[in-house]
Image (tube, helix red, strand yellow):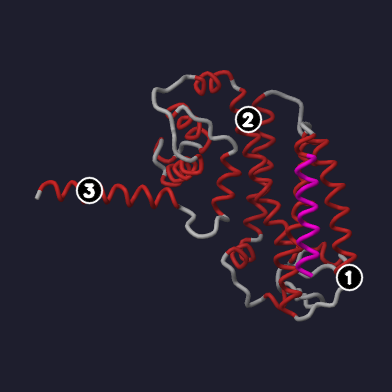
Amino acid sequence: MNERCKTLLLELEEQLKFIALETDNSLLNAELSIQVTQKILNNLKSFIVKYKFASTAEEIKFFKDLKPLFHSRLIYHISIYNIETRKPNGGYKVIKKYLQNELDKLKRYFDSSFDFYKYYRTGNNYLDHKYFVRGKHDIRLSLETFYFETDPKFSTSHDYKISMILANDLLQVYLEDELLELERKEPKLKAEVNQKSDISWTGPKTAIIELLYALHSEGTFNYGKAELRQIAVTLEKAFNTDLGQYHRTFLELRVRKGNRTKFMDSLRESLIQRMNNADEDLK
């Protein structure tokens, strides 16, 4: 089962990468990606419907860890398609408001699903036998209404919720990148970015992005009222660098195995070592 899923997932990733490389238009990219993802998801469904899981644990693993990797891509690209087709014609303020409203929708979904989100993100498993085993749904466990319309042979009560969480992670990055690109098109901000500094950032890009999010989280600028993208533009200008798609990099940092704050911890250790060295010099 694992090998079959791995093969299909690799095929999906390769086809989506090819589409992204060959297609600059967001709407066409989404449309083609939906077609590819739907086809591979149907292949996965055909396999699973006929497959007999060796144990309950294997069934849980599939519906909790594997199926959402496929289904989340479908949800994501459908969301992009809908966002792009509904995007209004207008200037900077109109489009910014539209994109911000889409981000607000993600926040509302997060708030409405907070208990399950917390259960999943913290690695809990005590309800997995109800959430991720077919035919074990419990009406009291916050069911989505669509569940009763799904194929019971290929769905559990909560695998869709995990797919939504993963899709929303990707969608948040997409929307924030769109907002950032919108900001960069503004003449004032563009002029600020193009002003060169005498100091250039020569460390890893992941390190400065750790710094960016740490400074924003700490509320260091404008009494905590500065927006993330404002701080990003300031860092780019001050250190003569391009942060690129820093929202996507932050998502990668969040799922990084091991130490997620490698640069922050290194800064702390370096400063403490310098203080210790200074203390030694005074002796």
Q: CA distance from mark 1 to mark 2?
A: 43 Å
Image marks 3 and 1: residues in contact by CB distance under 8 Å: no
Is the magenta region chiefly helix, strand or loop? helix
* Occupied quadrant, residue 91: top right
Q: Residue at x 43, y 48 (%)?
A: 263
Q: Secondary structure at mark 1?
A: helix
- Residue that mark 2 sits on: 181
Relative image position of residue 194 (x, y in whole percent) = 51, 20
- Residue that mark 1 sits on: 49
Q: CA distance from mark 3 to mark 1?
A: 63 Å
- Residue that mark 3 sits on: 275
Relative image position of residue 92 (x, y in whole percent) = 65, 25
Q: Secondary structure at mark 3?
A: helix
Range of residues picked out in magenta: 1-19
CA neighbours of label 1 inside 10 A, class few (<14), some (14 to 19), many (20+): few
Tell whether position 162 is magenta: no
Mark toward the start of the polypeptide (1 vs 2): 1
The three-letter code of the residue at mark 2 reads: Glu
Mark toward the start of the polypeptide (2 vs 3): 2
Q: Secondary structure at mark 2?
A: helix
CA neighbours of label 3 inside 10 A, class few (<14), some (14 to 19), many (20+): few
Image marks 1 and 2: residues in contact by CB distance under 8 Å: no
The three-letter code of the residue at mark 3 reads: Met
Q: Residue at x 53, y 35 (%)?
A: 243
